[in-house]
Image (cartoon, rainbow, N blue to C red):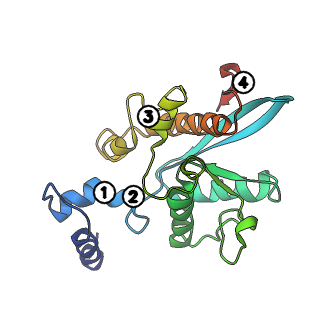
Amino acid sequence: MNERFKKQWERKASLLKNDDNLSSEELYYDRAAIYAEFGKIICIAVGLFTRVEEDRPGLRVKAFSGHDEKEILLEFKDLMEIKLDKQNLILCAHNGKEFDFPYLCRRFLVNEIDIPNVLNISGKKPWEVQHFDTMEMWKFGDRKSYTSLDLLASLFNIESSKVGIDGSMVNKVYYEEKDLDKITTYCKQDVVVTANLLLKLNMKPALEPELIHII
């Protein structure tokens, strides 16, 4: 980072809980990526429910990944705005309202790209926001705690996506191991877990494995 931005991180780091007494540099490596001001998008994985038969859904999963964040965002925007039905599109993520959706919006602005309408909630009434959040659904109004996707997957007997990698390892896998494919596979599996959790929270059976198509 340039000197101006280093100072900004120093200020940010001074406000973070730091029980291990990490230096600002160590904190940057450990936590900076979760803040849109300091992070970078390298993968966006998405899933689309498809109807096979009545009450028998399928799922198509693909990912946009690479080292060029702007290109990834443009491909994602093209999917949201052109290839899918904008009027009936509803987004779902685990903790999406607090993390995924705001992070995406901020990185769109940093890259000077118009935010897709389905993500941009500015000026919209609550009932006009086309977002589901499986963590919010599980809270039932309880604001006291965070419940991880992996915990709920265990609770509802959904196969975990945390095989060989979890979110805390992405930095190391990307910068040290230089294994973007591993991260992309993990993100795709996270989408499958989230889709199955959404079904379970709506009293529906999990997806049949043969009806999950991962591109």
Residue 25: x percent and y percent? 19, 61
The Cα atoms of the two marked residues, 1 and 4, are separated by 37 Å
Residue on which disc 2 sits: 34
In this orientation, which residue lies closer to the viewer: 166 or 182?
166
| Dot 1 or dot 4, earlier in sequence | 1
| Dot 2 or dot 3, earlier in sequence | 2
**Label 1 residue SS:** helix
**Label 3 residue SS:** helix
| Dot 4 or dot 2, earlier in sequence | 2
Residue on which disc 1 sits: 31
Please rate how many residues cluster around mark 1, counting C-alpha atoms within 10 Å: few if below 14, some from 14 to 19, many from 20. some
Which of the numbered marks, if any, corresponds to residue 182? 3
Please rate how many residues cluster around mark 2, counting C-alpha atoms within 10 Å: few if below 14, some from 14 to 19, many from 20. some
Which of the numbered marks, if any, corresponds to residue 145? none
Q: Do labels 2 and 1 touch, CB within 8 Å?
A: yes
Q: Is residue 13 above or below residue 95?
A: below
Q: Is residue 94 above or below residue 143?
A: above
The Cα atoms of the two marked residues, 2 and 3, are separated by 19 Å
